[in-house]
Amino acid sequence: MLSVDPKKIPSRLEIALDYITGEIANGNLGPGDKLPNEKELAQQLGISRTPIREAIKTLAVSGIVETRHGFGNYIRKDEGLPAMPLAMFKLYLQSSTPEMLMELRYVFDRNCSELASVRRTEEDLAVMR
């Protein structure tokens, strides 16, 4: 019997995630840059706005994108906190569930808090008061 290994066709969500993370990795989008709006991204990629929204939410939960209501979606600025390399992030997304993403976020937030407490200055404390 002939066994055929069909090539995996990327989901629309994967297409959107690959595009956005690729733009970041290639330097076309950097910290503080605004993402094109959902309609523009959907037209560029030839997909509906739903997977674009899902991709943006996924990237927001992961701390890569920040949504500013009424203003758009932006690549988060690097504030000296550790970030997951995009290649690792893409691999993780391919085999993850929303629960796994939340666990990852928990690990990053915990490590970021730890690092922030070590690096804090008296000025930082004054700003927080």
Image (tube, helix red, strand yellow):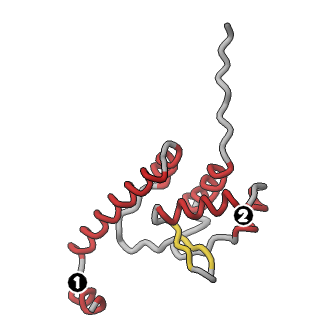
Residue toward you, 38 or 35: 38
Quarter of image, res 70: bottom right
- Considering only vertical position in the picture, is 129 above or below 54? below
* x then y, percent, for residue 46: 78, 55
**Amino acid identity at mark 2:** Leu
Secondary structure of residue under mark 2: helix
**Amino acid identity at mark 1:** Thr
Q: CA distance from mark 1 to mark 2?
A: 41 Å
* x then y, percent, for residue 35: 63, 70
* Quadrant location of the C terminus in the rendered image: bottom left
- Considering only vertical position in the picture, is 125 above or below 45? below
Secondary structure of residue under mark 1: loop
- Considering only vertical position in the picture, is 2 above or below 87? above
- Tell me if mark 1 has few (under 14), some (14-19) or many (20+) residues whose alpha carbon lies within 10 angstroms of its own: few
Residue depicted at x 25% and y 90%: 123
Residue toward you, 37 or 78: 37
* Quadrant location of the N terminus in the rendered image: top right
On the picture, is 11 further left or further right than 103? right
Which numbered tag is attached to residue 20?
none
Residue depicted at x 68% and y 38%: 9
Name the residue beneath numbered marker 1.
121
On the picture, is 120 further left or further right than 84? left
Which residue, as the protein is rendered here, is positioned at the far top?
A: 1
Quarter of image, res 112: bottom left
On the picture, is 76 further left or further right than 6? left
Which numbered tag is attached to residue 41?
2
Could you tell me if the residues under marks 1 and 2 are in contact, i.e. CB atoms within 8 Å? no
